[in-house]
């Protein structure tokens, strides 16, 4: 099983270059970075995990810039977002950014897709909250049109998103980057995964024995290859029993949570997690 990592990299933590080099040298499989463009000071949306919002949410680095640095100093480390808030982006520009990072890294990029939890942040981006999932679905199809080998037009039915048939290079390796959708289990999420993704990033990885059969049913009902579905438990704190359980369920990769700390704290966590490699 591949052991990847995720961390809130900020202006106060270990740097992307230092972390990426340490991860590759120690044999970790990948690095996934989260995204928040800003956190409005006047907030009404509660933090999903309860309590006050951790300060690293307000200082997180742009994941694409940070992953570009990581790509430049590594050769094998997988690079991903966990997650990109697709609805907060112009999908034409995002398609270019994703394709460029995947091309320059030699096909190492995974696009983690999320719908967001902070309504105030989304409001500032002009996101219609109730429509954000459908907006994201149509944005993903628009990006796939730009990544297609031949100029391909796309017009969304609900979002107003569209692109005319266009020349757009570079292309991601394999035609599209590996795409994983994050979020809580449910029929709407599983329909998204079966529609445009390669698999699921369940945050925390709880309850998979119960939910995986439901996801597999939705996946196969959509005509997808049963063997192609990827499930990557995300932001977990590992232990031998938990990792063995994921392996039994067929998970080939897990993503462990690193502390959003200075260099010494993060390297000590890597030393501890290296026992599971």
Image (tube, rainbow, N blue to C red):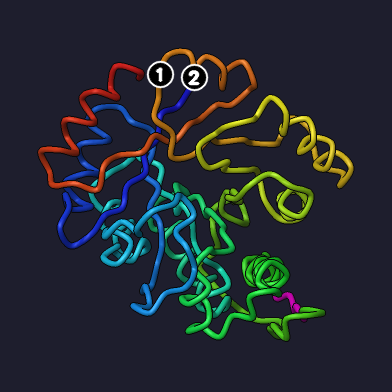
Counting from the top left corner in percent of width and height, residue 270 is at: 24, 30
Instruction: Identify the disc placed on residue 56.
Output: none
Q: Dots 1 and 2: beta carbons under 8 Å?
A: yes
Q: Which residues are magenta?
A: 151-155
Dot 2 alpha-carbon crowd within 10 angstroms: few under 14, some 14 to 19, many 20 or more: some
Q: State the residue position of label 2.
A: 242
Counting from the top left corner in percent of width and height, residue 56 is at: 27, 58
Instruction: Identify the disc placed on residue 239.
Output: 1
Identify which residue is drawn at 33% across, 31% down.
Answer: 28
Foreground pick, 209 / 169 = 209
Dot 1 alpha-carbon crowd within 10 angstroms: few under 14, some 14 to 19, many 20 or more: few
Identify which residue is drawn at 35% across, 40% down.
Answer: 77
Q: Is residue 135 magenta?
A: no
Q: Is residue 200 left or right of residue 259?
A: right
Residue 271 drawn above or below residue 34: above
Q: Quadrant of residue 47?
A: bottom left
Q: Quadrant of residue 257?
A: top left
């Amino acid at each position: 099983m591949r052991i990847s990592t995720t961390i809130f990299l900020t202006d106060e933590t270990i740097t992307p270059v230092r972390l990426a080099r340490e991860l590759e040298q120690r044999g970790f499989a990948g690095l996934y970075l989260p995204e928040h463009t800003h956190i409005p000071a006047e907030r009404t949306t509660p933090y999903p995990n309860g309590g006050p919002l951790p300060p690293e949410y307000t200082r997180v680095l742009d994941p694409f810039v940070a992953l570009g640095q990581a790509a430049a100093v590594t050769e094998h480390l997988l690079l991903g977002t966990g997650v990109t808030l697709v609805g907060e982006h112009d999908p034409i520009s995002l398609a270019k950014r994703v394709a460029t990072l995947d091309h320059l890294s030699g096909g190492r990029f995974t696009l983690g897709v999320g719908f967001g939890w902070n309504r105030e942040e989304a409001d500032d981006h002009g996101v219609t909250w109730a429509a954000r999932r459908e907006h994201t679905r149509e944005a993903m199809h628009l990006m796939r049109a730009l990544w297609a080998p031949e100029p391909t037009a796309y017009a969304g039915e609900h979002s107003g998103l569209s692109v005319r048939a266009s020349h757009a290079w570079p292309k991601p390796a394999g035609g599209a980057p590996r795409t994983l959708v994050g979020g809580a289990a449910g029929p709407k999420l599983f329909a998204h995964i079966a529609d445009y993704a390669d698999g699921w990033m369940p945050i925390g990885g709880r309850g998979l024995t119960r939910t995986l059969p439901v996801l597999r049913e939705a996946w196969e009902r959509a005509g997808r290859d049963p063997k192609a579905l990827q499930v990557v438990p995300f932001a977990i704190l590992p232990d031998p029993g938990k990792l063995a359980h994921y392996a039994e369920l067929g998970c080939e990769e897990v993503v462990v949570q690193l502390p959003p700390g200075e260099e010494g704290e993060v390297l000590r966590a890597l030393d501890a997690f290296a026992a599971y490699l």
